[in-house]
Amino acid sequence: MKFLRKYTRKYWKLFFTAVLFLTFEAICDLLQPTIMSKIIDIGVAKRDIHYVLKMGGIMLLVTAFGAVSASTRSIVASTVSQNFGAELRSDLFKKIQSLSFKNIDRFDRATLITRLTNDVNQVQIFVNGMMRMFVKAPLLAIGGLIMASRLNLRLAVVLAVVVPIVALLIILNMRLGFPLFTKVQKALDRVNLVIREYLSGVRVVKAFNRMDVEIAKFTKANCHFQDQSISATRLMSVFSPAIMMTVNLGIVAVLWLGGLGVESGHIQVGHIIAFTNYMTQISFSLMMISMVFNMFVRARASAGRIGEVFEQEDFQTWTDEINEIPSEKGRIDFEHVSFSYEGTSGEPVLKDINLTFKPGETVGIIGSTGSGKSTLVSLIPRFYDVSAGIIKVDGEEVKDVQPQRLREKIAIVPQQTILFTGSVAENIKWGKEDASTAEMEAAASIAGAHDFISVAPEGYQTKIGQGGVNFSGGQKQRISIARALIKKPEILILDDSTSAVDVATEAKIKESLKKYAKGLTCILIAQRITSIIDADKIVVLDHGEVVGVGTHEELIHECKVYQEIFQSQIGKEVL
């Protein structure tokens, strides 16, 4: 729970301000039964109306002061808890953003959403409850015990029996509840995962009429969440009635012993009424303590899950010592590079890669599905660290360069097209926030997107739906390319980014890119051999190994894998 220290240091003054007013509120509540006892035993017993009015006035003043204290406490507590929750959620989101892909891959995306929302809410509710019930309940319980004991020691024997039993029940509640609420949060993760998968693939689900399957999958996850919640709630529900029954039996004992005391003349009627009120307050406070511990159990489980994210240490380190040696901008060197997603112990996805991409070159990368093409280029901006070997960009080893400075040189169009909600212009300007309209239109023209954007009713201000649903696959790819081009990078990586574009449009984009790409290193990953056939250099990958490097003419005669790809796509007769 180390992550909570920051917020403790920031909010402790306001927290204790709320606790102070809460203490005043509790003291006012504790004074009232004693005042009532005096009114009955002195004012009513002696028929002294002046005393009754005097003490009644004091009682009203105490009540008013308690109400003001309660209102102030409520305002401060709400301010602290809401600010704390918002800041914790923001810090958690920033932490997730700062993590490397290797760190993020340790968590399912759905569980990160749950931790950002539900888990933060559970901790926030507990913090708010601490300033409302957690402090007041012990104050009422302890204060009630002291005030009741001062009234009558004989009746206080009942409390000596009741309080330890209730304390034991609360401890059992806490010990048994924590594991159950941890399971509840994990079950909620599963529900969120199913919902996220369905919403992201809703078109495929409907196209294949698989709604029943998705409903069954959701029902299974939802029922599991329901079962886990019922198990946890059922256990928790046993303790509250048990505590209430114990306290009520104590009140019965007080009334019985008090009745005997009144008959013998050892106890006054007002004392019994006051003692019963204190027992009720103690009962209420013990119930609150039980509720607080229920909240604590859930908050502890949620805080542990949040802490798991904050405890993630970024595996990527760097010195960021700027290389003073003049280097070729856009040069990329792979020196004996191997990579595995499981680190040095896993099966290598890339094996002993040795490549050099020179500034101004257009490099095509081709290979069968799963050959490691996308993995290879993901190592350049250091999304992952190599398991062995060295990668250099501009003559600097990427492990020594701050990721932000490294990625400023690189623009990527990923294999899976991602557009964000907002306008087309806002999406393109992701590459350069301060880009002018002319720059934006120029980038869109090179990407072949200007024509279809400009004929839209709102042009570049056309709103993009969730995931870009109001654009075709090819249109989304071209907007993504424009977003990369407007950045004017040293290195441009296009990961199969024209797969949804027709051949004629692809040819136009490639022609425009040739003029644009002069002086920058352009890496094209493609499934279609026609997409990279005229590249300055083509790299052929097969099962994570480089099996050929050269121009199309060289590879068509020397590389068997390239020949097989060519034959399968274009035909043997062309050879």
Image (spheres, rainbow, N blue to C red):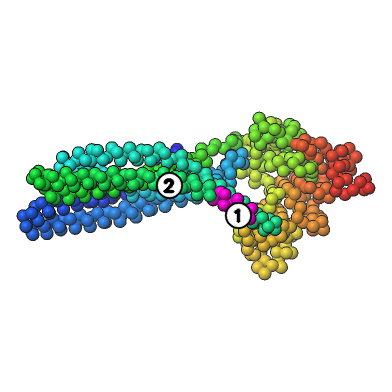
User: Hey, which residue is sitting farthest top in the picture?
Assistant: 345
Hey, what amino acid is under mark 1? Answer: Ile
Q: Is residue 439 visible?
A: no
Helix, strand or loop at disc 1? Answer: helix
Task: Describe residue 196's horizontal placement relative to residue 440 as left or right.
Answer: left
Image disc number at residue 233: 2
Q: What amino acid does circle 2 point to?
A: Thr
Which of the pair 90/469 is nearer the observer?
469
- Residue drawn at x 76%, y 46% is 525
Q: CA distance from mark 2 to mark 1?
A: 26 Å
Up/down of 154 relative to 198, above or below: above
Q: Give the side of residue 33 with respect to residue 474, left or right.
A: left
- Mark 2 neighbour density, 10 Å: few (under 14) some (14–19) many (20 or more): some
Residue range (magenta): 212-222
- Where, quadrant-wise, is the N terminus in this rendering? top left
Quadrant of the image for the C terminus?
top right
